[in-house]
Image (cartoon, rainbow, N blue to C red):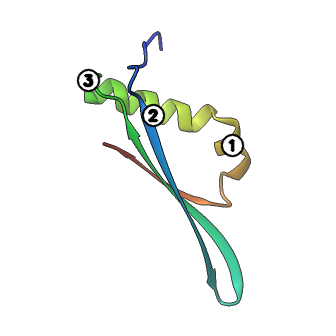
Amino acid sequence: MNVMLPVDTSVDAEIDFGTTDGAYFLQARLNVSLPGLPRDVAQALVDRAHQTCPYSKATRGNIDVMIALI
């Protein structure tokens, strides 16, 4: 996307481990901060990263992930 990431870019990851009906599950919340980038550009960058990230690909359909742009 030819976007220079701000030096103070951050991602805060929270991982939950739970059970339901006797089965274990994981879920994740990612809070992404891209200060200084226009919101639409930052959201497009986050969306693309989630589609191409090897970890996202490996866990897609197995772990619920909520991504918030803050």
Q: Position of residue 59 (x, y in %)?
A: 69, 52
Q: Is residue 25 above or below residue 35?
A: below
Tell me the kind of residue under disc 3: Pro
Which residue is rendered at x = 38% and y = 26% of the image? 8
**How crowded is the residue under tag 2: few (<14 C-alpha within 10 Å), some, or many (20+)?**
some
Q: Quadrant of residue 3?
A: top left
Q: Secondary structure at mark 1?
A: helix
Which type of secondary structure does the marked residue at label 3 adopt?
Answer: loop
Query: Can you name the residue that lies furthest to the top here?
Result: 2
Cα–Cα span, label 2 and label 1: 14 Å
Q: Residue 24: x percent and y percent?
A: 70, 78
Q: In the image, what residue occupies the spot 27% across and 30% down?
A: 39
Q: Earlier in the sequence, mark 2 or mark 1?
A: 2
- Residue placed under numbered mark 3 in the picture: 38
Q: Position of residue 51 (x, y in %)?
A: 58, 36
Per the image, label 2 sits on a secondary structure element best described as helix
Q: Give, as a three-letter code, the residue at label 1.
A: Tyr
